[in-house]
Amino acid sequence: MPRVIAGKKVLFIMMLFAAQFCKAQQITRYNPDTIKTIVLDSVININSHKLNVQDFIDAVTSDTSFYKAFQSMRQYSYTAENSIYTYDKKDRVNGRIYRKMNYSRVNGKPNTQYIAKSDSGKVFKKNGRYELYTVEMFDYLFANTYNKPLASPSNNSKGDGSKNASYKDKLKTLIFRPGTKVSGIPFISGKTEIFSPELKQFYYYQFARGTYLDSIPVYRFKVIRKPSTAPGDVMINEMTTIFDTRTLQIMGRYIDMSFSNMFVSFKVRMNIEMNNFNGELLPVKVSYQGNWDVPLHKEERASVLITHTGYRHND
């Protein structure tokens, strides 16, 4: 009997070791965004320039170019490629949506021509709706914009009165008006105002020069949460904005957000990049990685990559 017990102990230790080894070797979540669009040249001291910190803050908080860029898409024909991945609790891919399509207008009406289309895994519910609310939101904001006008992001907008409309409006505010208050979210609303007197103390700034899309000289203005900041004091960990040095036009924006309390837990990273076409700013890439966990709802884990190419003005 002692030998049997000893044998079981050895087997248990071996299994424990194997489990730890497997955990250490676990593949991290797949990131579909492998496109490197900015190369940094050097860190700069903003005090040696004509511009100061407040100039960049004002440019970020007053910017409307991102919203206008998504509105302007409807005046162009272009090719869109969308890849969406969903994950289980161990971050293993359990669903994929892939779309490649040409958007155009025929006789003044929107026209979508699919070049490629495939789905696999847990993507749709039995009623045909998306399995994850995250995917539905991105379809609304970035895939469906061509067919329907994108309503202006406003904290006072009531949309169609539905709960979904309210969520969509809040997401638009986070994307198009970062650094401003997002009303109607308990314990979170004020934590998005990273430039307010109350939250400024929790952040520091970094500046660098670089080259965007191989040819555009840019400033990178990075707002980073201080390591000493206590959990729960802020929601935005980092917000990076890319400015064209010649015009101070915003070319790209990256946001890293996370928060956790008894009502909600999430971690989201999102990147949106633009480029000029005949003098007009238009979106060329949107990437997203995120986890959402809300009581009474299924936990959502997803990553998204959307690219737009071949913009041509509709006649």
Image (spheres, grey):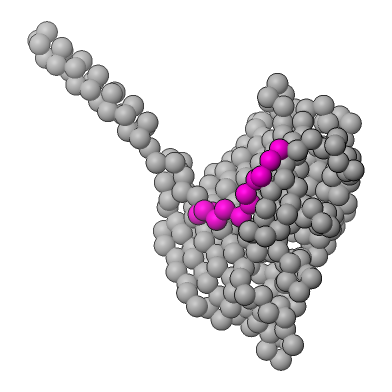
In depth, the one of 286 and 16 nearer the eye is 286
Asked where in the image residue 199 lies, by quadrant, the reply is: top right
Q: Position of residue 167 (x, y in %)?
A: 72, 53
Q: Position of residue 109 (x, y in %)?
A: 71, 85
In depth, the one of 297 and 237 nearer the eye is 237
Residue span colored magenta = 32-43
Residue 162 appears in the figure: no
**Relative height, residue 272 to residue 12 (above, below):** below
Q: Position of residue 24 (x, y in %)?
A: 37, 31
Query: Residue drawn at (38%, 37%), measured in percent from left and top?
Result: 26
Query: Residue drawn at (52%, 61%), measured in percent from left and top?
Result: 83
Asked where in the image residue 250 lies, by quadrant, the reply is: bottom right
**Relative height, residue 246 to residue 108 (above, below):** above
- Which of the image's four quarters has the C terminus? bottom right
Query: Residue drawn at (76%, 74%), measured in percent from left and top?
Result: 278
Q: Would you say 236 lies left or right of 156 here?
A: left
Q: Position of residue 223 (x, y in %)?
A: 75, 37
Query: Residue drawn at (62%, 44%), measured in percent from left and top?
Result: 268
Q: Would you say 263 lies left or right of 26 here?
A: right
Residue 34 appears in the figure: yes
Q: Would you say 29 lies left or right of 130 here?
A: left
In depth, the one of 244 and 194 nearer the eye is 244
Q: Is residue 33 magenta?
A: yes
Name the outermost residue toward the bottom: 107
In depth, the one of 108 and 313 nearer the eye is 313
Q: Is residue 288 magenta?
A: no
Name the outermost residue toward the top: 2
- Which of the image's four quarters has the N terminus? top left
